[in-house]
């Protein structure tokens, strides 16, 4: 589990045959093989550490659902180690399981912030709410507005300076993780769910209303 607060950025050294190698500024004395790291929001397990190079295994499923399939050596990535139980949760609960790939449609400077509008598949957009949370390439962001097929966020200078959003341009593909709470609610209220869908009658039967 992660918070969406990026610790540092790294650069891809190599991505081939199910192996991802990244140069990292993470503190080497605090990490070891087997630790989980969110790389652009995707939870990956460290397999080896050599100097400042971290290696990860990436499955075909991960490649299919993320932007790793189109990234090249030299590409920058956001890095965050797994959160510590009992620590502050300053972002929001991020699982590191990417739901879809989004695309930046517009970029607009507004006072000291930059307004970004992303497009995502309609079935993922329904998991988002205005003023809720979303993870974009692993970055915890507050949603300004939601449409049928996208959402907008405001990026402050601090976030720009510490993440890969400082280099984002229109048309850029990004990893998107929607809010885990929204996904559970959608699953439980779906007519085809194992519960048969959450209804007013079921709420009354169980004493909620």
Image (cartoon, helix red, strand yellow):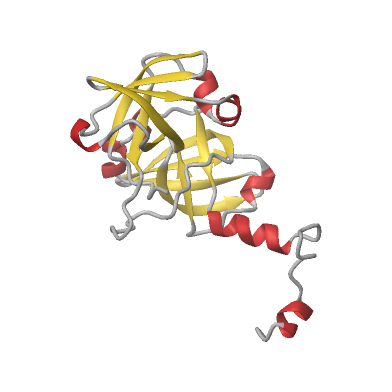
Residue 78 position in % (x across, y down): 36, 33
- Choose top left, top right, bottom left or bottom right for residue 189: bottom right
> In which quadrant is the C terminus drawn?
bottom right
Residue 16 position in % (x across, y down): 48, 13
Answer whether residue 62 is visible to the viewer in this image: yes
Residue at 75% x, 59% y: name it: 190
Residue at 54% x, 20% y: name it: 69
The number of discs equals: 0
Residue 66 is left or right of residue 188, and the answer is: left
Residue 186 position in % (x across, y down): 67, 58
Residue at 34% x, 49% y: name it: 83
Residue 30 is left or right of residue 110, and the answer is: left
Seen in the picture, residue 129 relative to 33 is either above or below; the reply is below
Viewer-proximal residue among 33 and 73: 33
Answer whether residue 171 is visible to the viewer in this image: no
Residue 92 is left or right of residue 146, and the answer is: left
- Choose top left, top right, bottom left or bottom right for residue 59: top right
Residue at 46% x, 18% y: name it: 19
Viewer-proximal residue among 68 and 33: 33
Residue 95 position in % (x across, y down): 48, 47
Seen in the picture, residue 40 relative to 184 is either above or below; the reply is above
- Choose top left, top right, bottom left or bottom right for residue 64: top right
Viewer-proximal residue among 90 and 120: 90
């Amino acid at each position: 589990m992660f918070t969406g607060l990026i610790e540092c950025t790294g650069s891809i050294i190599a991505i081939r045959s199910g192996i991802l190698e990244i140069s990292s500024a993470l503190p080497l004395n605090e990490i070891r093989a087997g630790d989980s790291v969110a790389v652009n929001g995707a939870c990956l397990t460290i397999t080896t550490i050599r100097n400042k190079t971290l290696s990860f295994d990436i499955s075909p499923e991960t490649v299919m659902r993320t932007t790793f399939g189109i990234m090249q050596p030299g590409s920058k990535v956001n890095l965050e180690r797994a959160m510590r139980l009992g620590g502050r949760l300053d972002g929001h609960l991020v699982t590191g399981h990417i739901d879809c790939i989004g695309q930046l449609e517009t970029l607009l400077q507004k006072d000291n912030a930059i307004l970004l509008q992303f497009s995502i598949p309609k079935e993922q957009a329904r998991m988002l709410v205005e003023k809720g949370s979303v993870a974009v390439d692993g970055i915890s962001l507050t949603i300004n507005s939601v449409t049928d097929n996208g959402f907008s966020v405001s990026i402050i200078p601090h976030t720009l300076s510490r993440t890969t959003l400082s280099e984002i341009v229109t048309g850029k593909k990004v990893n998107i993780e929607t809010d885990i709470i929204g996904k559970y609610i959608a699953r439980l209220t779906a007519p085809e769910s194992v519960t048969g869908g959450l209804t007013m009658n079921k709420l009354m039967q169980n004493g909620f209303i």
